[in-house]
Image: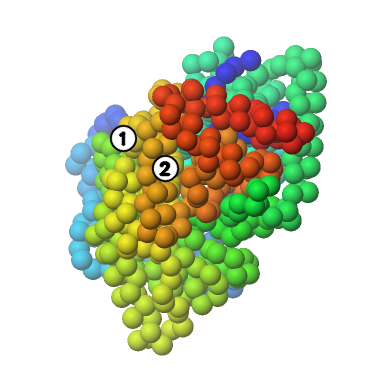
Amino acid sequence: MIHAIGGSEGIAIGKAFVLPNWEWELPEQKIEALDLAHEFERLYEGVKQSKSEIHQMKHELDETVGREEVSIFDAHLAILDDPVFMNEIQGIIQRQYKAAAVAVKEAIDHFVTMFDLLDDEYMKERALDIKDVGNRLLKHLLGAPEISLPSDNQPFVLVARELTPSQLIHLKPDVVLGIVTMIGSASSHSAIMARAFGIPLVMGVEGKLERPIVTGDLLILDGGAGTLAVMPNAETVGRYTELRRQHLEAKERLQDLVKVPAVTPDGSRLALAANISSTKELDAALSRGAAGVGLFRTEFLYMDRSRFPTEEEQFEVYRAAAERLGGAALTIRTLDIGGDKQLDYYDMPEENNPFLGYRAIRFSLDRRDLFKTQLRAILRAAVFGDIRVMYPLITSIEEVRAAGALLAEAQRELEAEGIPCKGGLPTGAMIEVPAAVVISDLLADEVSFLSIGTNDLVQFTLAVDRMNDQINHLYEPYHPAVLRMLRSVAEAAGRKGIPVSVCGEMAGDVRAIPIWIGLGIQTLSMSVQAILPVKAAMLRTNAIACRQLVEELFALRSAAEIKERLERFHAEAAIQDGSVHPGMR
Ligand code: PEP
Ligand code: MG
């Protein structure tokens, strides 16, 4: 049995399907003068294939969608016919003896950078088109980088070196029994999405395998324990089949709690809301009794396409979500791109520290055009439900004010244009960096609520990259420093009389419940799968005992002591309650 990192709980037993490496691997070698003609031929063939693919898509879309979508394809075709673009590529091949694929990539980069520098919306749009069609051309020159899965609809365990969030959104949870990745960490967005889809995931098995896994190998993975067995014997298969059955049964039993209010035995309430990345997750959230959405990660709406979503497209998504929630709160977090969340069609600058870089609110305040499009869509959708806006990675009040000013400007514009919208929306600041914790009293004066993003807060408080599996063991949400940060925010918000929620993964960790209750947090927003286990634990946890426990926890000196004390607390509550803790391992 291999011990690695548990990314998403659940047991999967099935045959492996191993993904080939899909990254663009550009040939480094220069080409020989004799091969120039061949390289040109490859380029023309790639252009021909790209055009015929675009024509085909255009044809399919013609009747089903609006003109705007179809006209994008016309723009792409025009680029492939554009002599300036083609001359640039040909020039690089001919003068620098570079392969066609390398020349295409360099030409894309050249034009995208040039157009992006211009302060002209139209030209920026053209840059995106070039990137999009250029990637299509690269695909034909180098082979498809997209995931192509077996087409026979037989369930399998997906094995990959690494999965990006945008690749994960295309997976069908009904055929993917589980996922194994060579690298990765549990707080990455890929892991968060696997949890949202309820797909068991084990990560970081690189260096632990006796031999590489090949397609067809029988695998057993336990995403809760972080273990993997390759070609297990019959006894192990039998044991895990039974464990899997028990696991599914326990999950089934939790469904009985859907309609039970989330109240402690001594009357403390906690709203248990859902984190979603797409409206597809709303049905699952509602079927588990979620009290609204506390975090809508809108960046996936941007990842799931080949260009930035239009105002209209975003409006439709937000409106549908608000309507589906029937009046329950929908907290829309504005675009949090950067770090491990990249867009295929937008080149982010090369950065040494992307998590500390050009991302989240910093990106939005720099690309005000894109930000305003999103804010306009949100304001329009707000007519249809209880929508709140939340800004990610806030570090100063200037950022909150600048975002607020743009929100007001967007509202004025819509009103002047006579487009229905709703102003005065509650706005919130995410508390994800120590600076925001320290000034949470100042931020509380600027917004209507605070929401603690523990995933980033843990990484920045402890200076532990949440994506780096080598230091995964140092990523410790129960570190006393993190607990002090949490208390500081809760106290500042309490003094200012505004509500605090927690929307990082820690909110869905059953162990942490007494901390939230003890600190007086009002809302926990978590992955859909965590809602019922958290509720089950809450129903047997006394608020008064939690307040005392929090006092005790703050006197402890290490994460190990804190976790041990929490586990003891839960075990005692389970004994008193006469139940076995379904969420505890
Ligand atoms: C967080 O950082 O805790 C959070 C909720 O945001 P994300 O995980 O999307 O960075
Ligand atoms: Mg975050």
Residue 176 visible from this viewpoint: no
Q: Is residue 383 above or below residue 370?
A: below
Q: Nearer the viewer, residue 377 or 433?
A: 433
As drawn, the label of residue 570 is: none
Sequence-wise, which precedes: disc 2 or disc 1? 1
Amino acid type of disc 2?
Answer: Leu
On-image quarter of the C terminus = top right
What residue is rendered at 19% in x and 42% in y? 95
Q: Point out the frontmost of discs 2 and 1.
A: 2
Give the class, few, some or many, for how many residues have Cα within 10 Å of label 2's Cα (few <14, many ≥20): many
What residue is rendered at 31% in x and 42% in y? 434
Amino acid type of disc 1?
Answer: Asp
On-image quarter of the N terminus = top right
Q: Secondary structure at mark 1?
A: helix
Give the class, few, some or many, for how many residues have Cα within 10 Å of label 1's Cα (few <14, many ≥20): few
Q: Is residue 336 left or right of residue 511?
A: left
Mark-to-mark CA distance, 2 and 1? 63 Å
Q: Secondary structure at mark 2?
A: helix
Disc 2 target residue: 486
Q: Is residue 483 left or right of residue 35?
A: right
Disc 1 target residue: 35
Give coordinates of residue 383: x percent, y percent: 51, 77
